[in-house]
Amino acid sequence: MEGCTNASALTREIQRLGYRGDVNTVRRHAKPYRAGAIPATAPSPHLTVRRVTDWIMRRPEHLTDVERKGLEELCERNRVLEATVEYARRLALMIRERRNEHLALDVWIADVRLDGQRELRTLANGMRRDRAAIQAALTTAYTSGAVEGNSPGSGR
């Protein structure tokens, strides 16, 4: 908005602020400004699996308006994705808030096994087999994080 349309300079500037993208993405977003047209709305972000996964797994209230709109548009075009988003968010909420309401995990697993896509059903089947460990993770404050991946003689 200050008039700089040099993609390399803009990329360096925003990378100092934490941007992890590349100059080509910045170039694509700066193009309308170089032509003298300032878009009325922000351009849609370049979609990647990582970006959409981030939108799905983040708390909905932490999404920007552009991110929320992008995910809504994707879900409108693909009802399977819409259902997957719902299952992923339900599971993330259960884990994030360590919810262990009676049968909540069992209900999630059953719902996914009946209605979810193949990949989610595979996840649900594995979770059903490891139910006791998952339930323990949801109900106890203990963690193996300090020793995870450390084995005798590993030099750690």
Image (spheres, rainbow, N blue to C red):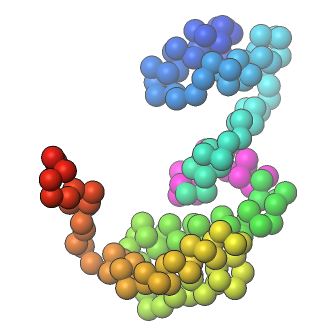
Where 141 falls versus 33 (above or below)?
below
Q: Is residue 14 magenta?
A: no
Q: Nearer the viewer, residue 136 or 42?
A: 136
Q: Position of residue 49 (x, y in %)?
A: 66, 47
Where 127 falls versus 31 (above or below)?
below
> Residue, x 65% and y 12% (percent of image)?
7
Where 61 falls versus 86 (above or below)?
above
The stretch of residues the image draws in magenta is: 58-73
Q: Position of residue 18 (x, y in %)?
A: 46, 28
In screen coordinates, is 78 left or right of 155? Answer: right
In screen coordinates, is 148 left or right of 90? Answer: left
> Residue, x 43% and y 70% (percent of image)?
95
Q: Nearer the viewer, residue 133 or 95?
A: 133
Q: Quadrant of the N terminus?
A: top right
Q: Position of residue 21 (x, y in %)?
A: 58, 28
Q: Nearer the viewer, residue 64 or 140?
A: 140
Q: Main secondary structure of the magenta part?
A: helix
The quadrant holding residue 89 is: bottom right
